[in-house]
Amino acid sequence: MRGKFVAGNWKMNTDLAGGVALAKSLVDGIKADGAVTAGLASGKLRTAVCPPFPYILPVRDAIQGSKVELGAQNCYMEKPGAFTGEVAAAMLKDIGCGLVILGHSERRHKMGETDAQIKAKLVTAQAAGLEVILCLGETLAERQAEKTFSVLAEQIVGALGGLPVDTLGKLVIAYEPVWAIGTGVNATPQRPRNPVPARCGRGPGGRCQPRRQEVFAHFAGRRRLKSYLGWRRGRMMP
């Protein structure tokens, strides 16, 4: 059975004092909860925080020595160089991050990130030694139009198609329905387990057409995700 993973994306929130206090309170809360402490010690549970860039270092210091993992909210697809305002994956690894969130819906819809850009970031992040949390999710309009399967299929194939199968060993997939973010409408525990088809056939116009089996959402199991993508000679089929 796969373990549980709870990762907190702080987005563009907190200040220095508040971020450090929040991190320390998380560590203290874990110490006070025997079940959580045992889960983390056994590997059946993981937890992480992903603070804004300016607060990564002080938060890292606040969680030092605990089982709380450190992540970032984004990275750039290029190696360090002349890219003003961007942050390289190698830089995040250098300061102690083990994780990075990619493909978040806010970056897809507000910043216009494409599947191709997310894929390039994923490759660079994994090459730098970071584990990627890949976010997928459909909007309310897409859900109402019964496009959930096709949207998520396109996002998965767009980010992972053609990559080595070993990519899955350093990947967490987080199903994040856009219609449940800040709307007051919450996804039920049943919904995230049934959002994506396990294989994707090619339909008219080369678009993905869902079939019956499913990849579980929230966090993707490697064998089932491999089944979804298909692979040949060690590479996932686009």
Image: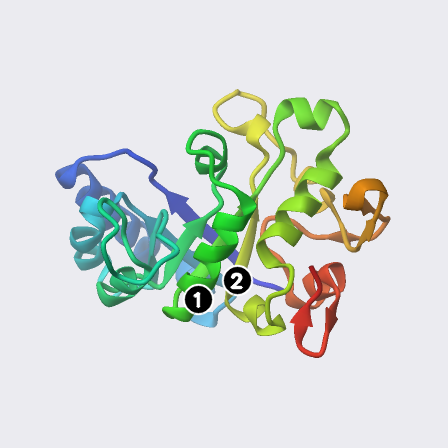
Is residue 3 shown to the viewer in this render? yes
**What amino acid is found at the position of numbered circle 1 in the picture?**
Gln
Disc on res. 217: none
Task: Give the secondary structure at mark 1.
Answer: helix
Q: Earlier in the sequence, mark 2 or mark 1?
A: 1
As drawn, the label of residue 126 is 1
Side of 128 relative to 147 (left or right)? left
Q: Name the residue under label 2.
A: 171
Q: Residue at x 29, y 57 (%)?
A: 88
Work out which quarter of the rendered image holds the N terminus and state it.
bottom right
x then y, percent, for residue 134: 52, 51
Q: In which quarter of the image is the C terminus?
A: bottom right
**Identity of the residue drawn at 53% across and 58% down:** 172
Q: How far apart are marks 2 and 1 (CA)?
A: 9 Å
Which residue: 47% across, 71% down?
42
Looking at the image, residue 110 sits to the left or right of residue 97; the answer is: right
* Residue 27 location (% of width, % of height): 28, 54
Question: How is the model colour-coded?
Answer: rainbow
Q: Which of label 2 and label 1 is nearer to you? A: 1
Looking at the rendered structure, the kind of residue marked 2 is Leu
Helix, strand or loop at disc 2? strand
Q: CB atoms at circles 2 and 1 under 8 Å apart?
A: yes
Q: Is residue 10 left or right of residue 202?
A: left
Residue sitting at the far bottom = 233
